[in-house]
Structures are given as structure tokens and as C-alpha cells.
Image: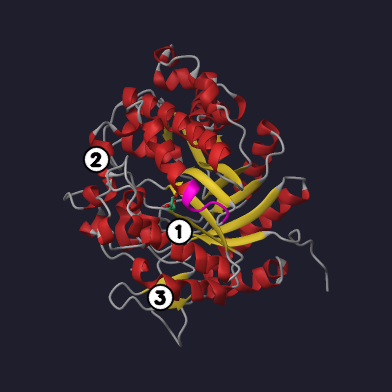
């Protein structure tokens, strides 16, 4: 039998979720409303008018969910904290009961030997802060650092891995530049300001962490290798703009201390002049790791009518797409990992999300057979291993997602879980991909070759 290379000892195998997508009970125990709570309760925003009111009912079923994690053999669990549970008014006093929910979760994970990998902000902002301008407001950096400091103090020593933000690019692109996520502003000026303030908030939280916290802190971004539809110079230039906008917009300032020059073509020449130069010092803080969320690639062509980028997506034929309409492109994961190492150096990396939405068949003999999701995981893990063998400092991998859950504007119509959720009975059923992932973890990767 050929022995294939395995993942390094101590590789952190996990699965990921986020607060609003799984918890339910959004206003329980003194929590304040979040922007997502409000958005889903405003007609017309979410497919099927779905809301996160019940979701996976994880707020009440978290103990059982930890048992499922044990059953999968997970070494780590990535989840986010709902700011509006902990500080219902966004700033000011802490809601003890909200904090206690996470304390019970974190203590139990630690008792069970599952590493809590905690995200401070995965898109659900206290609604009162959105009313005050959200991330387009400069004060948002202090709001966030204040909340972060409370949390660092409360869980000091209990959590070793912290991330400030999940995918700041999506917050800006979907919520400020376009109108698909809250606050649905659709404004280039607000997008530029929100991006900058998210980076300032990230830096301020890292500074607070160094002062009062312990363990490691990083940032989680979503990356996509970008391709030009043709070799024509206009298409290549469009590709370069999209690459800067999506892949470099947050990493360059956070890790290199400057914005990519091509961002001027998106936000307008001189856009940075509205910000004090000293901001960059606050943004450019040393961090301990980088989290990469990877799903697909992007192919673009030049399109002057598509403002502000002048680029539109191209969808190749005869390739596989997931239910999200995302092309399955496993080699893109290796390409992203190698690109990050080349551009930003040897910072430790975690794949903090990777997975696929496919429609699942009904439960059969106590299982859900999902061969396409299983194949997706297998191919992406092979690609990640390839990057590791080429010297990328990859330290862990998190499947998205532990459970089927509330997929933002797609509501419950898209299923990403390793574990299926029946939204009527809340019954959980392991899918074949979960059993496969368990074998991967047990064998430290050998199962991806079987
Ligand atoms: C990512 C999000 C995550 C989930 C997956 C499918 O962009 O971080 O919450 O929705 O996509």
C-alpha cells in the first residue's frame, strides 16, 4: 500500500459555525437585537422570509451539539460570540447572562478536550450601533475594542485562539457597497469608510488583547484566486482590480501597513486622504495567525458598466457548481495558501472555513448520503496537503459547517452541514461527509487517499 504524506502531528482539525446562523433565541436572557435580527424581520430580505429566531436552537441544545463534536472526534470548534448578548446596548454594561452562555459553552468544550477557536464578530452587530452609523462611523473602532476587552478579560486563560473579524470584505461588499446584507447602504463612500474602520477596529482590538488578554489573536479573511476571462489587457486589468479589492484590501494594511494601489481604481484616487495618516499604525499590529476561508475562484472580464470595479463575473461551462452557484475549484485552495505565504511571509495559517452546499436526500437508514460534499472535502484536503508539502505553515482546518444552518439571505434553503438538521423536529443526523471527516481526523489525513 502506498503511504501518502499525512498532516503534521497536532494539526487542529475542527468545524465552524457562527452565532446568528445556529443559536436561535436571539433576544433571550437580556440580549439586545442585532442588525441581522432586524434585517431578517424586515420583509423582502431573506429567501422564504426565514429568520434566525430558532435556527438550530443551539442556544438550548449546545450540550448535545458538543456531544456530536465528540462523536466526530473534533479537536477544535470555531464559533462566534454574539456581541448583542454580551453588551446589549453595544457599549457600556455587560449582560452577565449572555456572557454565562458562552462561559458554559467554553468550559464544557475545554472539559471535553475540544479547543475553542473564538471569533469576536461574525457579522451580527448590535442594532443600536448600526443606528449610529455602524462601521462607517469612526467611533466603531472604540465600540469594538471596548466589547473585545470585556470578553478578553472574561475568558482569559480559557480561550487560546481569538479572531477579531470574520470576512470583513463581505461586511463591506454586501452591506455597504451593495444592499444584500445590513445596513444595505449601496454607497462607495460608505464602503471605503467601513473598510477602513473595520481595519481600525481590528487593530484596536489587537492592542486591547496585548494589554489584557493571553493566547493568540488573528484575523479571518475570505480569499479567491482571480482569473481574467481572456489574455486581453483590459480583462487582465479587471482581474487585477478585483484581486486587490477582494484579496489585498484587508491583508495589505493589516500585515504590510499600506493599502494596495489598485484600490484607488475602486474607491477613487485620493480616497485615503480623508483618513489621518496615524490610522495605519493602529491598523498594522502584529498578529499571531491568519484564518483563510476558501470556497471557490473568480473569473472576470472587463465591464465598464459594472461600477465601481469595471469588472463582471464569467461562469465557465462544463465545471461543477455547488448549490450556491460557486464553482468547485479545489486547486484554488493550494493557490491561495501559497500566495499568502509569498506575499505576507511565514505567518501561521488556518483554513477557518471550507465546505459546500448541496441539496441532501432524506434520511435513509439513519444516515444522509452526500457523496458530492464528501468528494468536495476530499479534493480540498488533498489540495491543502499539497500546499503544506510545499512549505506553507498550515496549522489547522475547519469544515464549514458543523450543522446545516441559517445561510444569511439564502435562509435555510442551502445546506452546508456535516450534520443534517431537520428544522421541524431539530433532529440531527450525521451525513456520510461527517463519517468521512471523522476518519480523516482519526487517521490524521490518511483517509483522504482511501
Ligand atoms: C462565509 C461565511 C459563513 C457562511 C459561508 C457559507 O462567507 O463566513 O458564515 O455563510 O460563507
Q: Secondary structure at mark 1?
A: loop
Compute the Cα span from label 1 to label 3.
Answer: 22 Å
Q: Residues within 10 Å of mark 1 (few under 14, many from 20)?
A: many
- Vertical arrangement, residue 149 with respect to residue 154, above or below: above
Name the residue located 30 percent from the left edge and 63 percent from the top edge.
24
Residue 50 in which image quadrant? bottom left
Question: Is label 2 or label 1 in front?
Answer: 2
Q: Which residue is mark 1?
A: 17
- In the picture, measured across the screen, residue 45 lies left or right of residue 399, that is left
Q: Quadrant of the N terminus?
A: bottom right
Cβ–Cβ below 8 Å for labels 2 and 1? Answer: no
Residue 231 in which image quadrant? top right
Chain-order first, disc 2 or disc 1: 1
Is 56 covered by the magenta stretch? no
Q: Nearer the viewer, residue 296 or 24?
A: 24
Where in the figure is residue 450, as x and y percent of width and height? 70, 72
Using the image, tell me which numbered label, if any, was put on residue 128. 2
Where in the figure is residue 244, as x and y percent of width and height? 52, 28
Q: Residues within 10 Å of mark 2 (few under 14, many from 20)?
A: some
Question: Is label 1 or label 3 in front?
Answer: 1
Is the C-beta of the residue carrying label 3 under 8 Å from the nearest atom of ligand 1?
A: no
Q: Nearer the viewer, residue 385 or 314?
A: 385
Cβ–Cβ below 8 Å for labels 2 and 3? Answer: no
* Most distant residue in the left direction: 43
Q: Secondary structure at mark 2?
A: helix
Name the residue located 28 percent from the left edge and 38 percent from the top edge.
129
Where in the figure is residue 281, as x and y percent of width and height? 55, 22
Q: Which residue is mark 3?
A: 361
- Vertical arrangement, residue 182 with respect to residue 268, above or below: below
Whether residue 229 is visible to the viewer of this picture, yes or no, is no
Magenta segment boundaries in residue numbering: 152-157
Cβ–Cβ below 8 Å for labels 1 and 3? Answer: no
Amino acid at each position: 500500500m502506498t503511504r501518502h504524506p499525512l498532516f503534521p502531528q497536532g494539526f487542529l482539525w475542527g468545524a465552524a459555525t457562527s452565532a446568528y446562523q445556529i443559536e436561535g433565541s436571539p433576544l433571550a436572557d437580556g440580549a439586545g437585537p442585532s442588525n441581522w435580527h432586524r434585517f431578517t424581520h424586515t420583509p423582502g430580505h431573506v429567501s422564504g422570509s426565514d429568520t434566525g429566531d430558532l435556527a438550530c436552537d443551539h442556544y438550548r441544545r449546545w450540550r448535545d451539539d458538543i456531544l456530536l463534536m465528540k462523536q466526530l472526534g473534533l479537536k477544535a470548534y470555531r464559533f462566534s460570540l454574539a456581541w448583542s448578548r454580551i453588551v446589549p446596548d453595544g457599549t457600556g454594561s455587560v449582560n452577565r447572562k449572555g456572557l454565562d452562555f458562552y462561559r458554559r459553552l467554553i468550559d464544557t468544550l475545554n472539559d471535553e478536550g475540544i479547543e475553542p477557536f473564538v471569533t469576536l464578530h461574525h457579522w451580527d452587530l448590535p442594532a443600536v450601533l448600526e443606528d449610529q452609523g455602524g462601521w462607517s462611523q469612526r467611533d466603531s473602532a472604540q465600540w469594538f475594542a471596548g466589547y473585545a476587552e470585556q470578553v478578553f478579560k472574561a475568558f482569559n486563560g480559557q480561550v487560546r485562539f481569538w479572531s477579531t473579524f470574520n470576512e470583513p470584505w463581505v461586511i463591506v461588499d454586501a452591506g455597504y457597497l451593495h444592499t444584500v446584507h445590513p445596513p444595505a447602504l449601496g454607497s462607495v463612500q460608505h464602503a471605503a469608510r467601513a473598510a477602513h474602520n473595520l481595519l481600525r477596529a481590528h487593530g484596536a482590538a489587537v492592542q486591547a488583547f496585548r494589554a489584557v488578554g493571553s493566547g493568540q489573536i488573528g484575523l479571518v479573511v475570505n480569499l479567491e484566486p482571480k482569473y481574467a476571462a481572456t489574455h486581453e489587457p483590459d480583462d487582465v486589468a479587471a482581474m487585477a482590480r478585483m484581486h486587490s479589492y477582494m484579496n489585498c484590501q484587508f491583508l495589505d494594511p493589516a500585515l504590510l501597513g499600506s493599502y494596495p494601489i489598485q484600490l484607488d481604481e475602486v474607491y477613487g484616487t485620493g480616497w485615503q486622504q480623508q483618513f489621518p495618516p496615524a490610522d495605519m499604525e493602529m491598523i498594522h499590529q502584529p498578529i499571531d495567525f491568519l484564518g483563510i476561508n476558501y470556497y471557490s475562484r473568480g473569473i472576470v472580464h472587463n465591464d465598464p458598466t459594472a461600477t465601481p470595479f469595471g469588472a463582471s463575473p464569467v461562469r465557465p461551462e462544463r465545471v461543477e457548481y455547488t448549490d450556491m452557484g460557486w464553482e468547485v475549484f479545489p486547486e484554488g485552495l493550494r493557490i491561495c495558501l501559497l500566495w499568502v505565504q509569498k506575499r505576507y511571509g511565514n505567518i501561521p495559517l488556518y483554513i477557518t472555513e471550507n465546505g459546500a452546499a448541496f441539496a441532501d436526500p432524506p434520511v435513509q437508514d439513519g444516515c444522509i448520503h452526500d457523496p458530492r460534499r464528501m468528494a468536495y472535502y476530499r479534493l480540498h484536503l488533498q489540495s491543502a496537503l499539497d500546499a503544506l508539502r510545499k512549505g506553507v505553515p498550515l496549522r489547522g482546518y475547519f469544515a464549514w459547517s458543523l450543522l446545516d444552518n441559517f445561510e444569511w439571505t439564502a435562509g435555510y434553503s442551502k445546506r452546508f452541514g456535516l450534520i443534517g438538521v431537520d428544522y421541524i423536529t431539530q433532529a440531527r443526523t450525521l451525513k456520510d461527509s461527517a463519517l468521512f471527516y471523522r476518519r480523516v481526523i482519526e487517521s490524521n489525513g490518511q483517509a483522504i487517499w482511501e
